[in-house]
Image: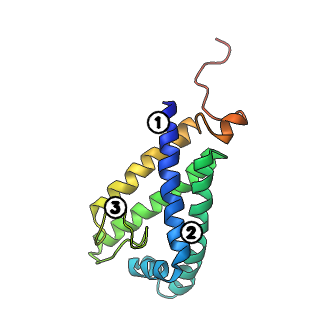
Amino acid sequence: MRWVLIACRLIVGGLFVLAASIKLRAPQEFANAIKAFKVFPPETGDHLVMTSTFAMPWIELMAGLMLIVGWRTRAAALIISGLLVAFIAAVVSVLARKLEVECGCFGKLEIICDGPIGACGIVRNTLMLAMTGLVLVRGAGPWSLDSVLGRGVVDTRCAGT
């Protein structure tokens, strides 16, 4: 389980750092991708698109880095899990409305899924959610700042027995 936790932290954290760095280098592309999803109401859409364009990459970057180094790992995993649930809901919404939308998650570099959004995006995000959920439940595992600070893995032994 130790190696699985490390792999989950590094894979999901690395993907989030990569996605954030791409979004930070091309904010207009990311804003266009958000607009294409049509998830914000028209009367507040531009304001929420701009807020998302500039806030989301920084949240992804910080949570991804925290996951990689294993510092406040459960908090980072919770934030990333919330983002992934929102991403899955957005993809389901796009598919239900039959919109032709490119993901924009990784800019022009698409990981595993390419072309318009489809079921592949749901599967990819669900796999990352499962990996993040494991870290959320089990903790950082070895080779993490949390383990050095004494809060790395859940102690499953019963106290007093």
Who's the residue at 43% across and 76% down the image? 39
Q: Is mark 1 on a helix, strand or loop?
A: helix
Q: How crowded is mark 1: few (under 14 residues within 10 Å), some or many (20 or more)?
A: few
Of pointers 1 and 3, the one earlier in the residue sequence = 1
Near-viewer residue (69 or 44): 69
Q: Nearer the viewer, residue 131 or 11?
A: 11
Q: Percent from the top left, x then y, of residue 33?
A: 42, 78
- Find residue 145 and report its horizontal and vertical position in percent: 68, 41
- Identify whether 125 is placed above or below 139: below
Where disc 3 sits, the SS reads helix
Distance of label 1 from label 3 (alpha carbons) = 23 Å
Looking at the rendered structure, which numbered label has been put on residue 121? 3
The residue where tag 2 is placed is 57
Distance of mark 2 from mark 1, alpha carbons? 26 Å
| Residue at the (36%, 55%) spot, across then down | 124
Amino acid bearing label 3: Gly
Callout 2, which amino acid? Pro
Q: In this view, does 1 lie to the left or right of 126?
A: right
Q: Sequence-wise, which precedes: disc 2 or disc 1?
A: 1
- Callout 2 crowding tier (Cα within 10 Å): few <14, some 14–19, many ≥20: many
Q: Which residue is drawn at 59% across and 76% down?
A: 54
Residue 72 shows up from this direction: yes
The image quarter containing residue 130 is top left
Q: Name the residue under label 1.
A: 4
